[in-house]
Amino acid sequence: MKLIQITDLHVASEGEFTHGVDVRQNFLDILQAVKSFAPDHLIITGDLAYDTANEEVYRWMKSHLDQLEIPYTAIAGNHDTSTVLAKVFDWEHRLSGEELFYKYTAGDQPLLLLETSLGTVSAAQLAWLTEELAALGGPALVFMHHPPIVGGVAFMDANYPLRNMEALQEVLHGHPYPVYVFCGHYHVEKMICSKNMTVHITPTTYFQMKWNQPVFELDNLRIALREIVLRDDGAVESTVVYYEGNKT
Ligand SMILES: [Fe+2]
């Protein structure tokens, strides 16, 4: 089973100023790269929108994603609105109130997709996650926008972390099997291991930032995807692949 994760696409309206990055061409280029991997599923972990949810932008993205003919799904980031995303992509049946968290079945592999668009994980979602993990009875694959742990990215940890990460960690650390988390939001490539949990932070298709600076500092304009291979023996393989980004 091969999955591709892409994250933090930040696609803007046509002509919108995006700090010199051609975010729309980056999106089109990364879709071509995704296609070349012929994955079984594509998972988008939030921040589809440049700044705020935009139906027109989401529709444009959907039309290109549909053309890929690869099953795909997405969750919202802090720059999206889950209800708008669900409406445009026909995922309203997956909403719990205004939250878009759900189990997505890739072949026979369940993936747990979390909702953190408001920067927290709700009590209702934690209860749902606890039940879903118990039902798994084995290793868990979790996709979310925010890292569920201090990322070691000084600027992001200080300003835009998942605010109740301890509550989520309690649930994930309580799972008696490995938990593999794939997230984004921090605009870096990182892996953090904590007890049974391995957190993979995936770089974006917008820009990457320096991880060791207390103030925001751009690192580079390369764009990336993450290939995730779920081997038959249960091993989980993960590779980040970079491409040239586009400037306006
Ligand atoms: Fe974000």
Image (tube, rainbow, N blue to C red):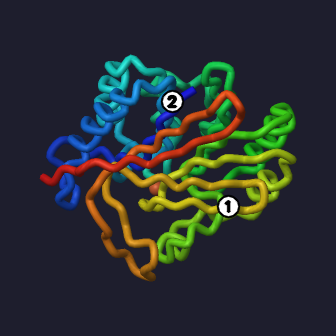
Q: Amino acid at mark 1?
A: Cys
The residue tagged with tag 2: helix, strand or loop?
strand
Residue 233 lies in what quarter of the image? top right
Above or below for 156 versus 146? below
Q: Residue at x 41, y 49 (%)?
A: 8
Q: Alpha carbon of mark 2 to alpha carbon of mark 1: how far?
A: 26 Å
The residue tagged with tag 1: helix, strand or loop?
strand
Q: Classify mark 2: residues with Cα within 10 Å, few (<14), some (14-19) or many (20+).
A: some
Above or below for 242 versus 133? below
Residue 205 picture location, percent across and down: 34, 49
Residue 109 picture location, percent across and down: 67, 26
Residue 33 lies in what quarter of the image? top left
Q: Nearer the viewer, mark 2 or mark 1?
A: 1
- Residue denoted by label 2: 73
Q: Quadrant of the N terminus?
A: top right
Residue 89 picture location, percent across and down: 45, 26
The disc at residue 193 is 1
Choose between 164 and 196: the one closer to the eye: 196
Examine the rendering and report whether any part of residue 80 can be seen: no
Residue 101 picture location, percent across and down: 64, 37
Q: Residue furthest bottom?
A: 214
Q: Residue at x 67, y 54 (%)?
A: 198
Q: Is residue 217 left or right of residue 200?
A: left
Q: Residue at x 44, y 49 (%)?
A: 240
Q: Residue furthest front?
A: 233
Choose between 191 and 209: the one closer to the eye: 191
Upstream in sequence: badge 2 or badge 1: 2
Q: Classify mark 1: residues with Cα within 10 Å, few (<14), some (14-19) or many (20+).
A: few
Q: Residue at x 39, y 17 (%)?
A: 69
Query: Assess mark 2: CB under 8 A from ligand 1?
Result: no
